[in-house]
Amino acid sequence: MALNFLARKISRAKWEPTPYTGPEGIRADAITGSCLRTQNDTIIENLRGRHVDLINLTMTQIIFLATDSAVKIRQNAGFYLFTKRAVLEKLRTAVNSGRLTLDGLNDKVKLEVLNSL
């Protein structure tokens, strides 16, 4: 299973090993919850065709996704971490270029983007 790009909000602490998981273990709540619950709500029109829902995964696929993600997160390699400021900058750029309208954002995010313009 090739995974070219995964964009999700994560809690980094959930991916770190703990005394009860051991050095290779992955906490169940790192891959459950909102990480695997998604729908094609991509708000930038020309990116919608690239969206893939993480549903109907087999256990093998979930294990691959979790293991691959954990290794990359723990080694600080092969992933990008964006601060809130950087995400707002990207949203602001998308709005200014016409790729994104503020109407597609929830009210809280819309207000933050407006305040950053």
Image: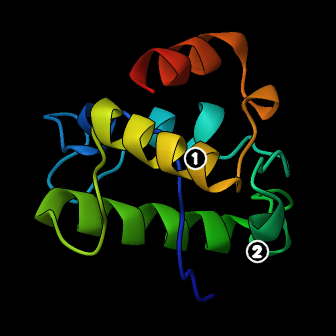
- Tell me if label 1 and label 2 are in contact, CB under 8 Å: no
The answer to whether residue 20 is seen in the rendering is yes
The residue that label 2 is drawn on is 50
The Cα atoms of the two marked residues, 1 and 2, are separated by 22 Å
Element carrying mark 1: helix
Position of residue 75 measured from the top left corner of the image (x, y, whole percent): 13, 66
> To which quarter of the image does residue 79 belong?
bottom left
Q: Is residue 2 above or below residue 89?
A: below
Position of residue 106 measured from the top left corner of the image (x, y, whole percent): 72, 19
Q: Nearer the viewer, mark 1 or mark 2?
A: 1
Write the residue at 45% across / 49% down: 90
Q: Is residue 69 above or below residue 89?
A: below
Q: Is residue 70 left or right of residue 76?
A: right
Given residues 13 and 96, the one toward you in this image is: 96
Task: Specify the quadrant that holds the N terminus.
Answer: bottom right
Position of residue 91 measured from the top left corner of the image (x, y, whole percent): 53, 42
Q: Is residue 57 left or right of residue 60?
A: right
The residue that label 1 is drawn on is 96
